[in-house]
Image: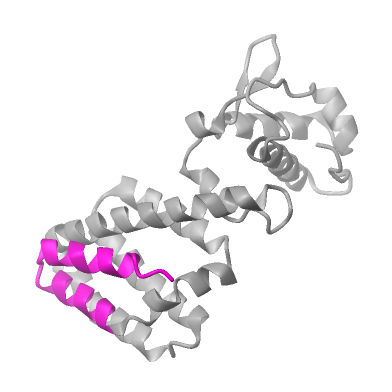
Amino acid sequence: MAGTTSTASQSPGTVSEQVFSALRADILGGTLAPGDALAGERPLAERLGCNRHAIREAVKRLQQAGLVEVAQGGATRVLDWRATGGLDLLTQLAGAGVDGTVDPQLGASVLPGVLEMRACIGADVAGRCAERAPDALLAELPGLLDAVRDARPEDLGAREDRYAELWARVVVGSDNLAYRLAFNSLVSGVNALGPVALSLLADELADDDGHRTLVDALLRRDAPAAELAARALLTTVR
């Protein structure tokens, strides 16, 4: 926590969020290692210039995220986040180094895995969408595809927004809540990279033929073809 700025002037909700983010960064970045005990509420509050309620709320969130274990009457100890954390950590890890809170090399090492999982989930999502989506949802896809194609390939931001809308409907069409939540986390992890992600995904975003192949397969309800088309699209990374 060394170097963490005072949060005394912030609103309570903002203070708790800042404390949580700072402690989470210390855990993900290795400043606090598995087995380490967090400082008590009073010393943490003094160090951060906030009240103890904000500390308690932040620690509760760390526990919910699988980053610490709170023992009744004992110390709060750091867990090995690789063994206990969830997909919600991807956004923090993929954005590593943007604000200097986590080792940038860690963030870089996470990205290939994010993209691999994105491709695997996306392929199965497309297949299930072809099998399960209601006709009304599939009927929306050509219009969403046209919106993607109307955005100039060089305007990556606009094209990515419209491409995300297309995929959002495909994910809904898969009728699988677990996939929807997982895909949301993966997209957030990629988006945390900002311009870096757009550069990496430029070829995928510009692949009009690939987009059309995917939508055509979905409209035919050809699940195997939809899976192949989705995997081809989601592995088009520079």
Is 152 situated above or below 57? below
Q: Quadrant of the C terminus?
A: bottom left
Residue 213 spot, x, y in % from top left: 20, 77
Is residue 88 something that shows in the picture?
Answer: yes
Magenta segment, which residues?
A: 209-238
Q: Quadrant of the N terminus?
A: top right
Of the pair 135 and 28, the residue shown nearer to us: 28
Q: Quadrant of residue 227?
A: bottom left
Say whether residue 237 is magenta.
yes
Q: Is residue 59 left or right of residue 65?
A: right
Of the pair 222 and 138, the residue shown nearer to us: 222
Q: Residue furthest top?
A: 73
Of the pair 149 and 225, the residue shown nearer to us: 225
Is 146 situated above or below 185? below
Residue 47 spot, x, y in % from top left: 88, 34
Say whether residue 46 is magenta.
no
Residue 149 spot, x, y in % from top left: 35, 87
- Identified at 67% across, 40% down, the residue is 29
Q: Quadrant of residue 80?
A: top right
